[in-house]
Amino acid sequence: MTTAATKKSSGSLAEWLKRLEDLHSREIDLGLDRVGEVARRLGLPLTLQATRPQVITFAGTNGKGSTLAMTQSMALAAGLRVGSYTSPHFLHFNERIQLQGQAVTDALIIGAFERIDAARNQADLTSISLSYFEFATLAALVIFAEADLDLWLLEVGLGGRLDAVNIVDADVAVVTTIALDHQEYLGNDLQQIGREKAGIFRAGQAAVLGSQNLPASVRATAETLGCKVFQLGTEFYQFPNQNSWCWQGQNAQGESLEITSLPWPELPRANAAAAVQALELTGLPITDQARIQGLAQARVTGRMQRQGAWLLDVAHNPQAAEYLATRLAEEPGKKRLAILGMMADKDQLATITPLLSCIDEWMVTALPTARAEQPLVLEQLIKKQGGKVVYCNASTQPEPLYAQARQRLDAGEMDQVLVVGSFFTVALFLDLLQRKEMPPCATA
């Protein structure tokens, strides 16, 4: 797809990204005033009244990326034209912005950045500072607005109410799960965090609640706004069959709908049910075959991602670790080595604890970010819980860890190596494994 955002660049994408890292005084700066004003200067279609495709926004502590991925996969299988925006990226910034399931080109992103820079520095108006994430979000919206799309899929970066993605009024808003995470920004109790995530709901529009265990504040917020609420276990359901599952819910016209013989996805099943409901509420044409094909093919980098004997998962909070542990328990009898790196601001003990029964030995590592926990701290924490740590990597390079883990696999001492704990941890190994392990990386 070609858009007007493509033109002669004022620097490489790498140069632009380096500039954006240093441009704003705060890495995370929640609030919609600055980014919203630049979006208005750009003439982006933010409101429900604007002429634009259907928009689904996804928020939640865990599962929002998986729900978006399955929604996208089903929509593409149905022949729809789709743009998706996710974060963070693993190896290349372009991963964040996709058209038709493919990362956009450097030229498209640079062209969007140039337009954003001109709008924020418009001569007759006050100059506006934007964070890296705000630039990225606006770039996605600029690219989507100029592409011929049927559907925009937008993943909230952090929180909901004050996240840059929330400058767009969603036709359908999805909240997947709520757990304690990012408390310094979102609050210290689940009800407060739930209200923040529910900030993506819009009055009178559809609100999809992807869990039966959400804090009451999420549904209460939706009902106060007069949203059409669809919650798993109340307005829509999933029922297991022997080798498949059945979904029951409502379509965009409020009519009851049942879809049978759906394949079990590799991603979380509750997320799959929410994805089916959200996509149905757009009113876009989706066949049963598209749902089946889309769910069977949906994949997410860094989530239950397998490459031979390697398994990569970004689980970095207790809720995600508990889900991962249930999946690992489905493969009993495996001798498993874990490579762990985590952020210092995460609940490390509660994240590690669910995994202890599934892991025979641990390696811990430093990560290339100032937010990372020291590996010695992780080592002592694991040992205090009775875990066995066989290597502590003070370097941010993955090669020493890879060499030792590969040796253990080749000797038959381990059956599987789990890389876990952070997007940074998984990113360390993605490129390395793709270069050293054949065939090319694939997800389970």
Image (cartoon, rainbow, N blue to C red):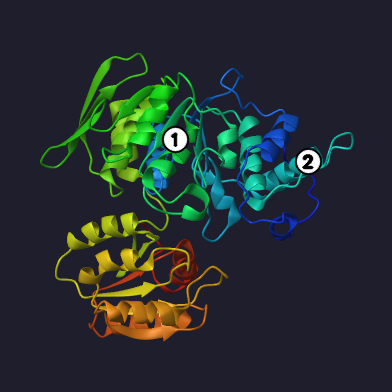
Mark 2 — residue?
A: 120
On screen, residue 118 versus residue 375, left or right, reads right
Question: Mark 2 touching mark 1, by CB under 8 A?
Answer: no
Quarter placement of the C terminus? bottom left
On screen, residue 380 versus residue 355, left or right, reads right
Query: Camera-side residue: 380 or 306?
Result: 380
Residue at the left extreme, as displayed: 242
Residue at the right extreme, as displayed: 124
The Cα–Cα distance between marks 2 and 1, rounded to whole angstroms, is: 29 Å
Q: Earlier in the sequence, mark 2 or mark 1?
A: 2
Mark 1 — residue?
A: 198
Could you tell me which residue is drawn at 15 percent across and 66 percent down? Answer: 332
Query: Camera-side residue: 194 or 21?
Result: 194
Answer few, some or many: residues within 10 Å of disc 2's Cα (few below 14, many 20 plus, some between 14 and 19).
many
> Residue 181: x percent and y percent?
43, 54
Quarter placement of the N terminus? top right
On screen, residue 246 versus residue 109, left or right, reads left
> Residue 159: x percent and y percent?
49, 44
Query: Camera-side residue: 364 or 370?
Result: 370
> Residue 147: x percent and y percent?
62, 31
- The tally of labels here is 2
Query: Camera-side residue: 20 or 227?
Result: 227
* Kind of residue at badge 2: Arg
